[in-house]
Structures are given as structure tokens and as C-alpha cells.
Amino acid sequence: KNQVEQSPQSLIILEGKNCTLQCNYTVSPFSNLRWYKQDTGRGPVSLTIMTFSENTKSNGRYTATLDADTKQSSLHITASQLSDSASYICVVTQYNTNAGKSTFGDGTTLTVKP
Amino acid sequence: GAVVSQHPSRVICKSGTSVKIECRSLDFQATTMFWYRQFPKQSLMLMATSNEGSKATYEQGVEKDKFLINHASLTLSTLTVTSAHPEDSSFYICSARVGTGKKLFFGSGTQLSVL
């Protein structure tokens, strides 16, 4: 069964600190992994997308890593800001010649406090 | 980047009425659109996949007669919640994809409250 597990479930950090969110998956065959940021009451916004051959992808203060061998990904947030408070969702898409199915993680709720 | 517009952002309705939610791709043609529902503090749950001009494919456990999906054009998909009940209250989100591309573009979501 395809699964995506994220940890921690929730995280509280002080403004300016760094943090790392984890995503482990069992989706196979693998096509791509995406990280989204979802503010409360809003739709998800894409942060990064990585394919099998990509190990690292950055988007400003967000850096995602991918280890396709161990099926793990991390999202590192540098110098956190209050606006980073949101839910971060890991989405893994299965390879399919027509259109792969995506499996969503339950998300990590990040709270950045001043 | 590509924009997906979802409307309305919030709707409150009486039990037994029907509610229509629209999802539009503003600057690209979306061959495939997805509809999700999300309960508080939970992740998105895929309800159905719709391809332009064909019937939607519903996920197991989703009533197709209750959640009517129409994808009549490459830029518009609609989700109609028929005979809404309080347990249908949820956050509904659409997403769109171009062909078999990797990127999914999400709408801003619709908060449905059924009284």
C-alpha cells in the first residue's frame, strides 16, 4: 500500500531558528515528490518538486532533500519567520505513463513564535 | 506561475440544498482536475479525478450521485454537493494539471458549512 508519513506531526520554534521536517514514503514506482505549504483555510502552495535524479532543491529559505534509495525526504527551513507558520504537506506521485496517482502525507503543523 | 481560481471561498447553506463549487484554470488549459476534501487538522483526501469531456473517476467510498463533478471545458470543473447534510461540512479544494506534467496547481479552497 502506498503511504506517506510525515514527522513531526507538529512543531513549535522561535522566530529566526531553523527546522527540518521529515517525509518517508513507500510509494512505488516513484515519479516525483513535492512539498507544499498550506496556510489555514487556504489551498496548498507548491514549494519544491523533485524527481528521482534530484537530491536537493531550494526555494528561498526552503531546501528539500530526497534520498530515493531510503525513500526519505526532508524540508529544511532556514531563519524561520512568523509567516512560515503553516501546515507543510509532502506529496509523492506514483509513476504511470498516463497520469500517476498522488499520495498525500498528513502534514506537519509548524508554529513560529516571536 | 499558473493560477487556479476556486469560487466561492466560503458558503453556508441549509441542510437539503445543493451547492456548486467552481474551479477555473486562469492561464492554462487543465486536462485533468482533482477534487479533495479536508477535515480540520487532516490532510487532503482525494475525492475524484476529472478529465475534460469524460466522466469523473471517483475514489472508493465517495458517492458519485452526491458529489457531481462536471469538467465541460479545459478551464472549468465544477463540484456540486447535492442534498447537503451537516456531515458534508468540510474544506473542499480543487487542483489542476496540464497533461501528464508533474506540477499540480491548487485552488484556494471552499469552506462549506451545512446547517
Image: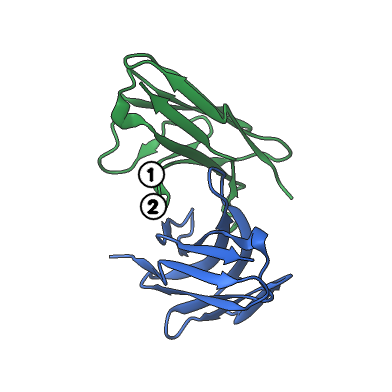
Chain colours: A blue, B green
Residue drawn at x 48%, y 59% as measured from the top left: A97
* Helix, strand or loop under label 1: loop
Residue A23 in sight here: yes
- Dividing the image into 4 quarters, which one contains the N terminus of chain A? bottom left
Residue furthest to the left in view is B61
User: Quick one: label 2, few (<14), some, or many (20+) residues within 10 Å?
Assistant: few
Tell me the subunit letter for badge 2: B
**B103 horizontally vs B1: left or right:** left
> Disc 2, disc 1: CB below 8 Å?
yes
List x then y, in percent, for residue A62: 66, 71
Q: Which mark is residue B103?
A: none
Whole-angstrom CA distance, mark 2 to mark 1, is: 5 Å
Quick one: A44 or B80, which is closer to the camera?
A44
Tell me the subunit letter for badge 1: B
Residue drawn at x 54%, y 79% as measured from the top left: A66
**A83 horizontally vs A90: left or right:** right
Q: Which residue is mark 1?
A: B39
Looking at the image, residue B93 lies above or below residue A18: above
Quick one: A111 or B15, which is closer to the camera?
A111
Residue drawn at x 51%, y 69% as measured from the top left: A12
List x then y, in percent, for residue B26: 71, 35
Q: Which residue is mark 2?
A: B42
* Helix, strand or loop under label 2: loop
What type is the residue that disc 2 sits on? Gln
Quick one: A75 or B4, which is closer to the camera?
A75
Quick one: B81 or A9, which is closer to the camera?
A9
List x then y, in percent, for residue B50: 47, 37
Residue B71 in sight here: no
Residue A42: name its quadrant. top right
What type is the residue that disc 1 sits on? Phe
